[in-house]
Amino acid sequence: MTITADTAKPDEWTEYTCTGCGATYSALPHARSPHQCAPATPTNRNGHPCPPWCTIDHEEERGPGLVFSHHSDGATFIRTPAWDYVAAGRVQIGDNSGGPQVSVTSSSGVAGALWLKAHDAEKLAGAVEVLAAAAPDQIRELAAAIRKAAAQITDPEAWAFE
């Protein structure tokens, strides 16, 4: 970090201000700085500090007016030959509430990300591993069953007893 002196007198202790963190300290002008400036903790666009594992550039515009405020360590993307994708990675809400979660997103189907607690993500990972041995038609059948169950839950008439 760059250090500036408020006044520089060769043989007197001088007060300095670190331009990196704003700390003030005293030292002789030609002596090695006793101040060890820690790098500034990066923050998201709302000023919340990033966890140590966050690698998102909170300044980069991802689309018109879209700048991420959540924290992430990036994601593993799996692309299909048709350029659809499924991605998974660690995320945390931008105000650091709730702790880290696992985000699973897909380019097809309902837009948005599925944010899971660690134990639920482990269960999903186990199911995905089982699907690796399934035929594409079996995977589509499972996807249809999941969508059907979701529709039945969100349909008020589905709660009626038959």
Image (cartoon, helix red, strand yellow):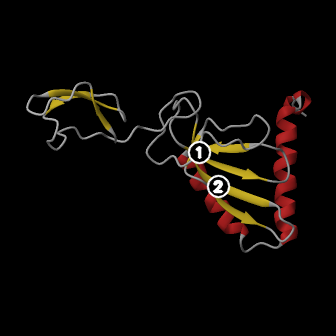
The front one of 114 and 138 is: 114
Q: Where is residue 82 in the image (x, y as percent from the top left)?
A: 87, 67
Q: Which amino acid does label 2 sit on?
A: Ala
- Secondary structure beneath disc 2? strand
Q: In this view, does 8 lie above or below 103?
A: above
The front one of 88 and 63 is: 63
- Secondary structure beneath disc 1? loop
Q: Position of residue 63 (x, y in %)?
A: 77, 42
Q: Where is residue 158 in the image (x, y as percent from the top left)?
A: 88, 33
Q: Which of marks 1 and 2 is in front?
A: 1
Residue contact at pointers 1 and 2, CB within 8 angstroms: no
Characterize the local packing of mark 2: few (<14), some (14-19) or many (20 or more) Cα atoms within 10 angstroms.
some
* Picture quarter with the N terminus: top left
- Which residue is found at the position 87% from the left and 31% from the top? 161
Instruction: State the CA–CA distance, disc 1 to disc 2.
Output: 18 Å
Which disc is residue 57 wearing? Answer: 1
**Lateral position of residue 91 relative to residue 11, left or right:** right
From the image, tell me which residue sits under label 2: 88
The front one of 8 and 4 is: 8
Characterize the local packing of mark 1: few (<14), some (14-19) or many (20 or more) Cα atoms within 10 angstroms.
some
Q: In this view, does 154 lie above or below 74?
A: above
